[in-house]
Image (cartoon, coloured by chain):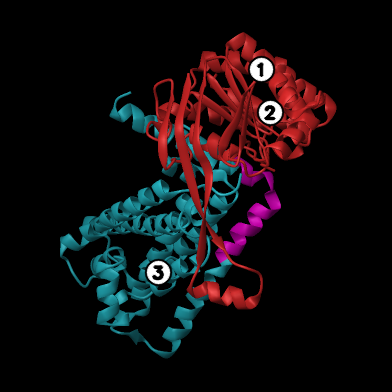
Chain colours: A red, B cyan
Amino acid sequence: MIVMENICKTYRVQRRSAGIKEACRSLFCRDYEYIHALDNVSFTIHDGEMIGYMGPNGAGKSSTIKILSGILVPDSGKCEIDGLTPWKNRVAHVSRIGVVFGQRSQLWWDIPVIDSFELLRDIYAVPEKRYRENLEELTELLQLSELLKTPTRQLSLGQRMRCEIAAALVHSPSLLFLDEPTIGLDAVSKLAVRDFIRRQNSEHGTTVILTTHDMQDIAAIARRVILIGKGRILLDGTLDDIRREGGADDLEKAAAGLYRKLEIS
Amino acid sequence: MNGTGRVKDMLHLYVHYVSLNVRSAMQHKASFFLQITGQLLTSCTTFLGIYFMFLRFHIVAGYTYSDVLLCFSVVLMQFSLAEMFARGFDTFSGMVRRGEFDRILVRPRGEVLQVLGSKFELTRIGRLLQAVIVFVYGVFAARVHWTALRVLTLVSMLLGGILLFSGLFLVYAAFCFFTLEGLEFMNVFTDGGREYGKYPIDVYGKRMQQFATFIIPYTLVQYYPLQILIGRSDNWVYALYPMGALVFLAACYAFWRFGVRHYTSSGS
């Protein structure tokens, strides 16, 4: 279970106008601005839930994920995941989570994918037997058998993303973070990825937190949607709530309508 | 897991990392061999510098040609070995910039082990090869008579030097947590340490010697133990001086920990 209570995070950002004069001035005196990336964020997520975490660019999605995955330390507030505080019990916590950053690869570029998987097996100290079983299952469901022996640099984006998702699940995590997992994928790959994630959840009870701008991803995967804007949680409900509040049946339009209505875009 | 089991497990993982690095490097055969050759040749210029210097002057601040060759080659071995193992810290700014440090933090292993493993630079073997050749030449030219103490001194110098330069790379990396600009100044201490370290430090005068003992302890891995190697001293305590680099490394590690706590990841 994930419990976030009144989490706040502020960044200090440097400000200056354009121009050489301003650039010189900033050498000596700098103006800083404080940006409240997260402002009293609270929510509770139960085991086995599938959450769509949405919001416009710069709303605080990444900051939330980074705090939940132990990368960032918040300024104040409480966060417990199965009794562990991510930034205090980093090692114990992260051995139970899987993270897919859609725009960043964790596979070694020049060598076959299977080599990266074997390194992950050693990093997470997965027992050999369980590794074999997991690999077999992932290979079958994501159709990796042809890809495992190929160096990462020779894979297409869709193929690579399937491998990335498998890499995040080699150690059978109970909590999976997906950050834009379908960005840039073709229709077939998108459907395959969505199918797989649903299946992972129903068969292994994996909790899934998905952040994306693709409303179809959210429609296909999430049963509960949390909307964040300007660092605050603005809506926590179902897809129907989004449609009703956004005033449109089409999710894309509803989301856009909602962003405008709440003045967060 | 008990203590030894954990160390064994970490070593096993590190070896796994190294093997992936080597496999990656082998993928590009031509580039691999060109880099080794390049490494071998670039540091030749330093050697030529010493060579021509001694064509003119037969003694520099009391040191003969072969003394300086020994000093130069040992420092070069220290540096290239440190670079081979700790290259991940030397290229750490790119890692932070590309957000790869986030990935390290979401894995259940120590940060240092993962950064070390991320880059094992086998091509530095070129530079190492050159150092070994010069060293062998220096040994013959100086007619070093090998005693147990001298062998011990050499091993100690190499170990201490690797630790010292690794510590410098670690500090270099730790600065990346605070700023990604202007890191060049650290090269004065890393590359500079290698370049100036070709002569025993006392050549540069008393002030420099003090700095290189108490601030960044180059003299501990170079000047003092060298006295044993070139037969100026039989004081066995000098053979232990390089282990002082451990204290320096500990301080560097403390700074690194401070940096990790300060880390705020960039971009989304």
Instruction: Name the image quarter holding residue A209.
Output: top right
Report the amino acid beneath label 1: Arg
Disc 3 versus disc 2: nearer the observer: 2
Residue A158: x and y in percent read 77, 31
- Which sits in the foreground, B206 or A73? A73
Residue B62: x and y in percent read 28, 83
Query: Which chain hosts label 2?
Result: A
Q: Is residue B132 above or below residue A182?
A: below
Instruction: Left or right? Give the position of B247 relative to A72.
Output: left
Q: Tag 1's secondary structure? A: loop
Structural crowding at the residue carrying mark 3, measured as other residues with C-alpha within 10 Å and reported as few (<14), some (14–19) or many (≥20): some
Q: Residue at x 56, y 40 (%)?
A: A231
Structural crowding at the residue carrying mark 1, measured as other residues with C-alpha within 10 Å and reported as few (<14), some (14–19) or many (≥20): some
Numbered circle sitting on residue A163:
2
Q: Is residue B186 above or below residue B46?
A: above
Residue beneath disc 1:
A223
Residue B263: x and y in percent read 45, 48
Residue beneath disc 3:
B193
Is the Cβ of the residue at disc 3 closer than 8 Å to that at disc 2? no
Instruction: Name the image quarter holding residue B139.
Output: bottom left
- Which sits in the foreground, B223 or A157? A157
Number of disc labels: 3
Q: Is residue B92 above or below residue A88?
A: below
The reply to whether the magenta stretch includes residue B29 is: yes
Query: Which chain hosts label 3?
Result: B
Tell if the residue under mark 2 belongs to the same chain as the one under mark 1: yes
- Which sits in the foreground, B264 or B173? B264
Instruction: Left or right? Give the position of A213 relative to A16.
Output: right
Q: Tag 3's secondary structure? A: helix
Q: Tag 2's secondary structure? A: helix
Report the amino acid beneath label 2: Cys
